[in-house]
């Protein structure tokens, strides 16, 4: 190849790169404008009537409230919990309303073989799950060195590994039909670390990483054609009894979130297809902005607000 030809190839390649950069800038401007528009004119909430919604941890708290709320909107609800008695009580409450079909299954979400077995049973008895809400979780509150090795393992088995087993069980049918929605409960403790919650925070950070990466993997593998949605929820401390000794310096400004408030935000995020949502909604933006401050400035703000959890002996 002559010098002239080499020069022309380089010029052509340079022009292609320049065109790609200009196209990228146009895309960025378009999506920024689209985001601003959606902020003022939110996406319409999709109906969940006729969807099969599986929720883990439905025996109490957020999971129970989610099951009741989705049933009231006409979804077929599948309740999963290790506590069979509490799960049956949730099922009976749904049946009393007569709003929708509901089913209850006992399952230890940390046990992969059990998850796959019960998932196959649900497919035969109910159908393919189209909305999966991974809600089950535990939150022991101790100083790090007071955690036993078994307790740390259990936190990760329920708060992290269970998400993998549930995805392995239910994502394939969603991919096959190109229809579905995965919702995962992380926590504000999955955005910023807190004392007395070291393993818990680590587990909730892991949930965020899992949801971001599986969503991106599916987008790339489908060449942008996947219609499956992924939503990660970051609640502040919710008044369900899970948080045994909350520490809040300004309770009027930073009150505990009620289960009803949390559930309303979770369902809103799912029906509008949000990728991430904190409860309250402003906390995700605040948490992101705080990260731009120098470490000492960030620590000063953390010390001023003095919120978190006390260690439970």
Image (cartoon, rainbow, N blue to C red):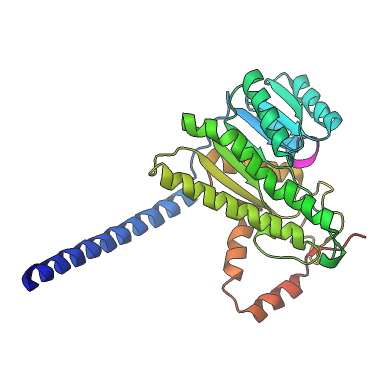
Q: Measuring from the top left, give residue 147's x and y in whole percent.
A: 85, 61
Q: Position of residue 95 (x, y in %)?
A: 76, 20
Image quarter (top left, top right, bottom left or bottom right) of the C terminus:
bottom right
The answer to whether 4 appears left or right of 243 in the picture is left
Residue 226: x and y in percent read 44, 39
The location of residue 246, given as percent across then percent down, is 83, 59
The residue at the point 26 percent across, 62 percent down is 22
Give above or below for 107 relative to 138. Answer: above
Q: Residue at x 53, y 46 (%)?
A: 274
Q: Left or right: 156 with respect to 141?
A: left
Q: Quadrant of the N terminus?
A: bottom left
Q: Residue furthest bottom?
A: 296
Query: Any magenta on residue 173?
Result: no
Q: Is residue 252 visible?
A: yes
Q: How many numbered marks are there?
A: 0
Instruction: Indicate whether 214 appears above or below 48.
Output: below
Viewer-proximal residue, 3 or 260? 3
Q: Is residue 181 left or right of residue 195?
A: left
Span highlighted in magenta in the image: 57-62
**Residue at image point 57% right, 30% down:** 130
Q: Residue furthest front?
A: 1
Visible residue check, residue 281: no
In which image quadrant can residue 227 be found? top left
Q: Magenta segment, principal secondary structure?
A: loop
Q: Nearer the viewer, residue 15 or 59?
A: 15
Q: Which residue is depicted at the point 23% across and 61% down?
A: 19
Q: Please tell me which residue lies in front, 65 or 78.
A: 78
């Amino acid at each position: 190849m002559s010098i002239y030809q080499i020069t022309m190839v380089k010029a052509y390649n340079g022009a292609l790169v320049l065109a790609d950069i200009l196209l990228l800038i146009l895309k960025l401007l378009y999506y920024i404008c689209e985001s601003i528009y959606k902020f003022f004119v939110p996406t319409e909430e999709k109906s969940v009537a006729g969807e099969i919604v599986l929720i883990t941890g439905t025996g109490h708290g957020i999971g129970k409230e989610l099951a009741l709320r989705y049933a009231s909107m006409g979804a077929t609800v599948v309740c999963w919990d290790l506590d069979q008695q509490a799960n049956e009580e949730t099922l009976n409450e749904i049946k009393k309303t007569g709003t929708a079909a509901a089913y209850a299954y006992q399952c230890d979400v940390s046990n992969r073989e059990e998850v796959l077995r019960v998932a196959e049973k649900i497919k035969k008895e109910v159908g393919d799950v189209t909305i999966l809400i991974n809600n089950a979780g535990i939150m022991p509150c101790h100083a790090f060195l007071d955690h036993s090795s078994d307790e740390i393992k259990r936190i990760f088995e329920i708060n992290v590994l269970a998400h993998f087993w549930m995805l392995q069980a239910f994502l394939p049918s969603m991919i096959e039909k190109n229809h579905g929605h995965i919702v995962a409960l992380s926590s504000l403790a999955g955005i910023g670390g807190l004392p007395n919650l070291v393993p818990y925070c680590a587990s909730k950070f892991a949930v965020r990483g899992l949801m971001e990466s599986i969503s991106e993997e599916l987008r790339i593998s489908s060449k942008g054609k996947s219609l499956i949605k992924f939503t990660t929820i970051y609640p502040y401390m919710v008044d369900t009894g899970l948080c045994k000794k909350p520490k809040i310096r300004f309770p009027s400004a930073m009150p505990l979130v009620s289960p009803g408030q949390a559930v309303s935000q979770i369902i809103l995020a799912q029906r509008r297809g949000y990728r991430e949502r904190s409860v309250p909604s402003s906390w995700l933006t605040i948490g992101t902005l705080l990260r731009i401050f120098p470490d000492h400035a960030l620590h000063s703000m953390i010390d001023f607000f003095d919120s978190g959890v006390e260690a439970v002996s």
